[in-house]
Amino acid sequence: MDEYIVSARKYRPTSFETVIGQHALTTTLKNAVKSGKLAHAYLFCGPRGVGKTTCARIFAKAINCLTPTADGEACGHCESCKASDEGRSYNIFELDAASNNGIEHIKQLMEQTRIPPQVGRYKVFIIDEVHMLSTAAFNAFLKTLEEPPAHVIFILATTEKQKILPTILSRCQIYDFERMSVSNIIAHLKNVAEKEGITYDEQSLALIAEKADGGMRDALSIFDQAASFCQGNITYERVSEDLNVLDIDNYFQLIDLALENKVADMIALFNSIIARGFDPGNTILGLAAHTRNVMLAKDIQTLPMLDMSQQQRQRYQQQADKCTTKFLYHALKIMNDCDTSYKMSNNKRLLAEITLIRVGQITQPDDDEPAAGRSPKRLKSLFNKIIASRPIAARQVAVAEMKKNNNEKTINENENVNDNEVPPKGIKNLSTGGDKESSPLRGNTGGMKLSDITISISSILNRKNTKEEETDEPTTETNDNSHFTEEDLTREWIGMCNRMKQKGMPIAMRLRNLTPKITEYPAIEVVADNQILLEQMMQIKARLQKTMRNALHNDNIPLTIRLAKSDEVRRYLSPKEMFDELRKNNPAVDTLYNKLQLVMEN
């Protein structure tokens, strides 16, 4: 039985030509070998498993090759190349800085730099994980690195360049290795599978490549694990089971259910995922990554950012066509909030379920269209819908009838109350014109009738939904010519200002301080306090006029805006001036002030 060698070692590149995914870097190194222009120190940086140490060995072998090829590769046949391949070369030294990070190890290495090579032109020192060296070791290494012997070349490799001293970085040629793309990993795994006689499907290799996270060594290790588990026939389902990876079909189903507002089905699917042993937080993170991929697949400019097979890209594009950009942005925001709060939550599963519920309600119809058994948030939307669905003439007749019925009902109720109920002792009947001061309820009721405090349907029906005038879109003329009063005008003006305030319009509060007047019916005049406010109002005059016409059901209303005269400008009083006016108009306040010996603060 032959000795088993893992794929990461068995298929390690032995020349620049066989290095995968680092074409620009290997071309630069080959050109340096061809021209003989070699630096005394190189720094190879990049994530794990992308070929830093492998390229360092290939480069060291090519430097000392006695008969290099025309393109800068090592011949592989000379004594120097054979010694390098067999691991017996005295010109190539490797040091693992993770386990030899002390100053004494660096001093021993520096002693060897004084001895010239026996065969070849250079002594090459490869220091792996160089960022693990101590500060003292770095300082000891710095002097030799600054002025090395002519026959010495240092090749440093690290995964964390930021931990290396700047004085070291400035003395090295720095090469940044790229992460392996999914397509490159899949191509290499196919080659290995064919050589090993292993059957596979494209989707399973894509899953292995994604799980490797850009590292070829990790991909080959996972490939060996999957080949052993699947017994030579690698399939997507078996690889998912072996790696305990959640099938992306679950993510596609969750997004589809969210688009259909099927929250209950989403929770049921999520429960089945948790039952298989997957963490709720990791599931939400996986769904967030899936949503991001869908967002990238929605635009042709971001589609190349999807590092996956062409088959998977097409599947993401199909789901992206179903999703709106607003849905994707909102879903990502919700899931990111869940990730932020996950560690602090005492009930992590509930937090994840609430996140799914929120995602499932993003496309929920608005209040005007209740769905999934949910009640509307506001009654106003329902009345607006009733008003919009009825003809204008019928609406006016209905409003008049409702007003009449409400008035008759109110009168009857008041009569019944006066005839059947006996007021308590000390309270006289309000309708008899008795002593008003003897009624303790006078301060609370203010002499109001039942009809004054009852919310009538007619008052709701008369309020028209005015979303149109809050936007720049034109509204449809109603051809109304209803009569209105100063009270109606003031009420609708304040209502318009409140809606503008909710939309964040800064002019809303300034408009609310103004009081529109009816000059010659139905003409309306608004007086601006200053020139700046006048200019701002003139810019939106058409919208203000349209709003008032729709709110008051009168299309013949002209709106005039003018600047206030000097005697019309409201004078704002100080607290002392206000108190003086109050004492002047009400002597009782002055009496209270003197008896209590109050003092007015400045």
Image (cartoon, rainbow, N blue to C red):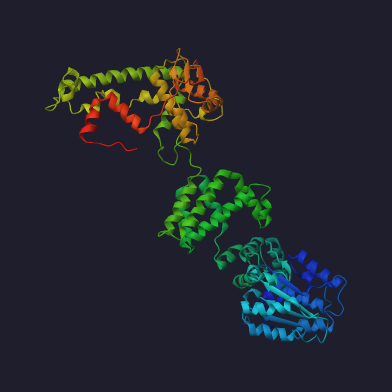
Residue 43 image-quadrant placement? bottom right
**Residue 227: image x %, image y %?**
63, 71
- Residue drawn 83% across the image and 68% down it: 31
- Residue drawn 59% across the image and 71% down it: 229
Q: In the shown orientation, is residue 71 left or right of residue 595?
A: right
**Residue 82: image x %, image y %?**
80, 83
Q: In the shown orientation, is residue 567 left or right of residue 157?
A: left
Farthest-out residue, top: 520
Answer yes or no: is residue 462 visible.
no
Q: Which of 582 and 66 lies nearest the eye of the viewer?
A: 582
**Residue 113: image x %, image y %?**
75, 84
Q: Which of 185 and 475 lies nearest the eye of the viewer?
A: 475
Q: With respect to residue 345, does 390 lie above or below?
A: above
Quadrant of the snapshot with the C terminus: top left
Q: In the shown orientation, is residue 397 left or right of residue 233?
A: left
Residue 87 image-quadrant placement? bottom right
Q: Which of 530 and 146 lies nearest the eye of the viewer?
A: 530
**Residue 510: image x %, image y %?**
47, 30
Answer yes or no: is residue 306 visible.
yes
Q: In the shown orientation, is residue 51 left or right of residue 478?
A: right
Q: With respect to residue 361, does 466 lie above or below?
A: above
Q: With respect to residue 136, does 372 lie above or below?
A: above
Quadrant of the snapshot with the N terminus: bottom right
